[in-house]
Amino acid sequence: MRCVEPIRMVRSIGLIACSGKEIWAPHILWENQHVDVSATEALQADNKSPAARDEAKKFLNEILADGPVMKAEIEEAAEANGIAERTLFRAKSELNVIAKKDGRGGAWTWRLPEQRKPPHWQD
């Protein structure tokens, strides 16, 4: 089975009534042959910036290097560093960061996985 990538494009879909400016939106032009991805996957492929994700992973490794940090503190620092929330969560997933809630009604904390835990740090 041969897989052909869809062609991702942006096209004009209309005009803004009050200003007359064009409205542009992404769309996919499918090939006649079998395609092995969904429309959603094809559109999301352009939204994933490896450079941004690498920066977010570096940020998480640095902020979590000394042990658990409150999620709210991480999100605030990420925003201050220009890291989008979605990018932060993708980096969290790729690094296998562990999220833990401190009891009922407690705050969420994030930490790096066991293999990256400093020897002096304990749960």
Image (cartoon, grey):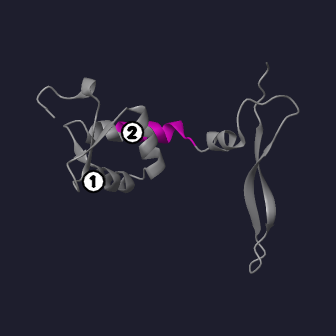
Q: Is any part of residue 5 visible from this angle?
A: yes
Q: Is residue 111 above or below residue 84?
A: above
- Whole-angstrom CA distance, mark 1 to mark 2, is 14 Å
Q: How many marks?
A: 2
| Residue 4 image position (x, y, % from top left) | 78, 28
Amino acid residing under circle 2: Lys
Q: Amino acid at mark 1?
A: Glu
* Residue situated furthest top in the rendering: 1
Q: 95 left or right of 25?
A: left
Judge from the rendering whether residue 88 lies leftward or rightward of residue 64; answer left or right: right
Q: Where does the image place residue 25, in percent across and percent down from the top left?
A: 73, 57
Q: Where residue 28 sits: x, y (%)? A: 77, 45
Question: Mark on residue 56?
Answer: none
Vertical arrangement, residue 18 with respect to residue 31, above or below:
below
In the picture shown, does residue 100 fall above or below 12? above
Residue 44, image quadrant: top right
Image point 26% across, 23% down: which residue? Answer: 115
Q: Where is the N terminus found, in terms of image quarters? A: top right
Q: Which residue is mark 1?
A: 73
Q: Which class describes the residues within 10 Å of circle 1: few (<14), some (14-19), or many (20+)?
A: few
- Residue at 44 percent across and 51 percent down: it is 85
Q: Main secondary structure of the magenta part?
A: helix
Q: Earlier in the sequence, mark 1 or mark 2?
A: 1
Q: Which mark is drawn over residue 92?
A: 2
Q: Is residue 84 visible to us here?
A: no
Magenta-tinted stretch: 48-58
> In the image, what residue occupies the spot 14% across and 32% down?
121
Measured as percent of width and height from the top left, residue 68 is found at: 22, 41
